Image (cartoon, rainbow, N blue to C red):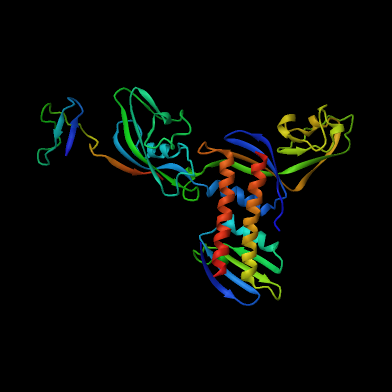
Amino acid sequence: MSYKCSRCKRDVELDEYGGVRCPYCGHRVLLKERAPTVKEVPVE
Amino acid sequence: MAEDFEVEFIEREDRKARFLVRGMTPAVANGIRRAMVADVPTFSVDTVRFVENSSVMFDEMIGLRLGLVPLTTPLDDFEEGDVVTLALDVEGPATAYSGDIESSDELVQPAELNVPIIELKEGQRLQLEADAVLGSGKAHAKHQGGVAVGYRHLHRVEVVGDANEFEEQEPNILRGVIEEAAAEHAADESAEDGALVPTSEFDNDLTKRYPGKDVEVHDVPGAFVFHVETDGSFTVEELVRRAVESISDRAAELEEKVAI
Amino acid sequence: MELRVIDKTDEELRLEIAGEDHTFMNVIKGALLETSGVAAATYDVNPEQSGGQTDPILSVKTEPGTDPLDALADASRRVQDLSTNFTSAFEAAL
């Protein structure tokens, strides 16, 4: 799962066993990025 | 066998018209009105593929807004179910307008260029590809070509006497079109019997047209004043023609199937 | 448009017309009533609130000597003539 640290803005790979924490700055708030794939949406 | 119609235009623009039809039954008038709203197909965005959407709105909301953008629809060149691909790519700070949509087919373009889709701030971007499908208003309102389509009876106003002189006359509001029948009492000098006058010419108020007179309003039987407005997908003429054609086609199909 | 005959006698017809709504049914009903030999004509889009039935059912009764199917064909013809007349009157007014 790829996240972004909300303090240092670096990409973070979240490790299930390491807890929720940025390995670079130790910040505990991580933001989930939008998937880089093309998303198809039906219009209704 | 079938009756003859008389058609007269009162107001005529590309996207908006008013015309009078004489010799029509209410069933046919309503059939044509309903066909204009629900049976004449137009192009409308049906599927959107989002490459990037860093705007503040969800993909679905932007999709919905794109669906409501009217697209020009030359019905001679397409049939129901046909697909045209559109693309949009706008980077903030800017507002994405319908005019920014690029079409793969020059015949199918946004009919209105200044419909705002979303306002983008610095660093936000909207990049997408969309499929516009030719469908009918029966399936979804976004496919309706006719907006504000309706009809009223033609009115005939009769002057039946004088109003009470010593009383302030109350406004007598009437909307639609009148067939002048009492020109000698009309406030307008150039009034002529038999002329068609939209009530907006006298502020929809009969006391302004016939000051100091008592009037009675009657519907003219079999005379309908249609008011037709399109969303820009095609002209009013095209819409009316196609609506009548769709009814005729169904009658032909029924006749053929009944014969078997 | 798919037709299903429900009842048919010499002077009566009940016909289900799948895929149509008031737009066409009311026009064809109006045309039937103006057709000679037709005693009564009506349609119902939701007969007796029958669970989910929404295809209209056209009922035609004719006077002796007229086949209801012929009357329906006449009425369809009439709607087509009327459309042609309207279109030409409309184009003439442009």
Q: Position of residue B173 (x, y in %)?
A: 74, 35
Left or right? Give the position of B219 relative to B229: right
Place of residue A39 in the rendered image (x, y in percent of width and height, measured from the top left): 28, 41
Q: Viewer-proximal residue, B244 or B47?
A: B244
x then y, percent, for residue B176: 71, 38
| Image height of B5 relative to C60, above or below | above
The residue lying toward the viewer, choosing from B52 and C26, is: C26
Examine the rendered structure and indicate whether residue A27 appears above or below residue B44.
Answer: above
Quadrant hosting residue C13: bottom right
Q: Residue at x 61, y 33 (%)?
A: B13
Q: Quadrant of the C terminus of chain A?
A: top left
Q: Is residue C70 left or right of residue B192?
A: left
Residue located 58% across and 59% down the image: B251
Q: Residue at x 55, y 55 (%)?
A: B249
In the image, residue B88 sits, relative to residue C38, either above or below, namely above
Residue B208 horizontal side relative to residue C60, left or right: right
- Residue drawn where x is 50% and y is 60% of the image: C19
